[in-house]
Image (cartoon, helix red, strand yellow):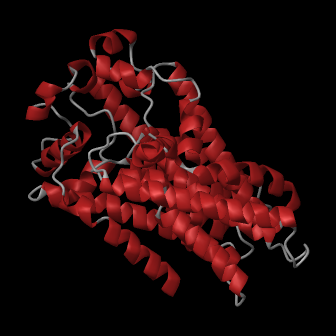
Amino acid sequence: MLATAAVALVSIFFHWQALQRTPSNTDEFIYLSLARSLSQGTGNTLQGSLILNALPPEMYDHPVFNHPPGFPLLLVPFVAAPKNAVIVPILALCLAALSVAWVGAKFLVDRTLTSRLLFLMVLIAAFFDPILSFCSRRIWMDGVLAMWIGIAYAALIFHSSSRRIPWALVLACLCLAAAVGTKILMAVFLVPAAVLIFLQSGQQKWRDLLILCVPSLFVLAVWEFVFHAATGQWLPKWLSIDADVLRAHPFMAARADQPLLFFPMMLVLLCPLAALTIPAACLFIRKSGGEVRRVIALTLSAILLYVGVLVILGMGGFSKESRYLSPIMPLLGMLFAGVLAALRNPHAESVLTPSQKIFLAACVLAILAGGFLAGFHLVALSLDEPISLARVVPGLFGHWFR
């Protein structure tokens, strides 16, 4: 508890500069305009707002906005002081990291020094995740999505334990519904969660499956009905931007004109820990057992499924931005905790092998590199796209080699 509080306070301290900035990004103005519209009773729409004059009408001039109102509703209390709305994504980062800490404490915390050090690694990786830190400095929905998915999956992991905690399942279903009510793409995360529940033994799995899925599917159905009634379309244009829209707006075309494997590439480049954790999870999923195996299987499948969906959407013109990876970042932290727990399997040898020690050392370096990127992004507030070490390090130290 003390270590978690200390790391959280340090993370909040580094966000001080973000709290001082004034919103400047177009997406920030969009969400603040939506919040103002909701507070005035106009509805979840940009029509009638000044920001619409600077946006492509094909994408934004609709009676209802492209996304459900989940995120603008969180911003409504800040309409009178929009600068303070950045508190929402900062708080979202902290809660997403705490969801990782919740899972890490379950599998790693005991009286030994080794377990506490491993848990500290998980804490630092979660609170100083480079992608979530980048998202937390702007009034964007991405960090909020990470919060909802992180809490939902953490609660689901606790429910899937031998104790079958009922309130944890309710928390998971509410958070998943909130995520879908923020962005419909988050319905993807229902699939691994539903499979986990379905694989449970006993007759209660059908009841649990309904509790988990019905709220999210209800939110999705209501939104689709509202969106179709207002626009005549079932799917918003952001899922697959039309070629004529891209031709008319070069800045949108630049986002879509990225390599096919943009999202998996950026996941590895921006979060070095992912390059170690995902392959290690594929190895340990067979060697681990019980609850640890379920954690690894659940989070790994969710990460791979979501990245796969992003790649497929990218083939159809989906805008490629690194911050869209944010929902899986707390899951990566939980996956990392599962891998570390597998290393400490009580059925394995008590002494780590040389290869395991090398892996842990590499993880420490990856966490430090990720923390460095997180700190850089919190200082460079003008960036609209995160940058990897390959660009930061030469920029900082290139003059040494001139």
Residue furthest to the front in view is 402
Locate the C terminus and report the quarter of the image it occupies. Answer: top left
Q: Is residue 61 left or right of residue 172?
A: left
The reply to whether residue 301 is visible in this rendering is: yes
Residue at horizontal 48 percent and vertical 23 percent from the top: 258
Q: How many labels does the image show?
A: 0
**Viewer-proximal residue, 179 or 370?**
370
Q: In this view, does 278 lie to the left or right of 319?
A: right
Residue at horizontal 31 percent and vertical 56 percent from the top: 379
Residue at horizontal 58 percent and vertical 33 percent from the top: 309
Q: In this view, does 205 lie above or below 195?
A: below
Residue at horizontal 49 percent and vertical 70 percent from the top: 98
Spot occupied by residue 206 in the image (x, y as percentages of width and height): 69, 55
**Viewer-proximal residue, 298 or 45?**
298
Q: Is residue 367 left or right of residue 6?
A: right
Spot occupied by residue 118 in the image (x, y as percentages of width and height): 66, 74
Residue furthest to the bottom in view is 111
Spot occupied by residue 249 in the image (x, y as percentages of width and height): 28, 16
Q: Is residue 163 above or below residue 18?
A: below
Q: Is residue 55 left or right of residue 219?
A: left
Q: To which quarter of the image does residue 62 belong?
A: top left
Q: In this view, does 310 lie above or below 36?
A: above
Spot occupied by residue 383 in the image (x, y as percentages of width and height): 31, 43
Q: To which quarter of the image does residue 162 belong?
A: bottom right
The reply to whether residue 203 is visible in this rendering is: no
